[in-house]
Image: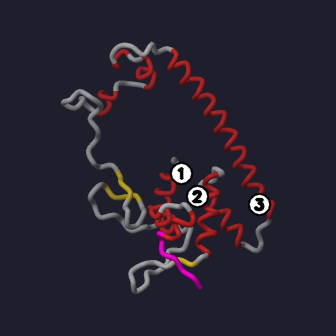
Amino acid sequence: METMLIGQVAKQTGVGVETIRFYECSGLIEELPRRASRYREYPASVIDRLRFIKTGKELGFSLKEIEELLTLRVDPRATCAQVKQRAEAKIADVEEKIKTLRRIKKTLGKIVASCKGEGPTEECPILDALGPSVGAVFGSRPENGHGPTLPPTSQLCVNGRSGCIGAPHGDIPPPCDETARRRDRDYFEEF
């Protein structure tokens, strides 16, 4: 059986190495043990599974929905009607998102039309429509006067080794537990 390294799998599928690692951490693809070479060797079957996941994402399915579809695919008791039901639900979801995007476009168009594109940002109707001054939310502006003062580096970063989010910048990342997997999956669903 021919095996491949993660870089080869990424190249053949068009799925990034970090994304493949995330899918392993999430349980969407099997997390294989490392060989003596300290590398994981992937069977050719992982290519089809990654392509399935990628196509599902392109069609708007969430990772949770894709996981359900993968489960249905291998369940001998599952029916095509169950798969169709999920696809029809996705169509309804897409139609709702289209309505929402149309409302956003209409509102944004009105806001943009109210701006002459002149004057200081403190008088900008677009920024006023978005809410209170960013400086009021984050604190005073930096010395150069441009942009808000950002919160401290307590924001989460993606851990390149495990692919899970969860550690403040510079800390040792937590292991991929079920809670972290769910949280990370929800986080990535937003993008």
Decide whether residue 4 is among the magenta residues. Answer: yes
Mark 2 vs mark 3, CA separation in Å: 17 Å
Depth check: give the residue in front, 173 or 46: 46
Depth check: give the residue in front, 158 or 89: 158
Locate residue 132 relative to residue 61 in the image: left or right. left
Secondary structure under tag 3 reads helix
Determine whether 126 is above or below 72 in the image: above
* Earlier residue among tags 1 and 3: 3
**Residue type at the position of mark 3:** Gln
Decide whether residue 72 is among the magenta residues. Answer: no
Locate residue 135 relative to residue 46 in the image: left or right. left
Secondary structure under tag 1 reads helix
- The residue that disc 2 covers is 63
* Earlier residue among tags 2 and 3: 2
Determine whether 89 is above or below 176 in the image: above
Which range is magenta? Answer: 1-7
How dense is the environment of label 1, judged by Cα within 10 Å: few (below 14), some, or many (20 and up)? some
- The residue that disc 1 covers is 189
- The residue that disc 3 covers is 82
Residue shown at the point (26%, 31%) measured from the top left: 139
x and y percentages locating residue 47 in the rendered image: 60, 70
Question: Which disc number belongs to residue 162?
Answer: none
Q: Determine contact: label 1, label 2, CB under 8 Å.
A: yes
Quarter of the image that includes the N terminus = bottom right
* Earlier residue among tags 1 and 2: 2
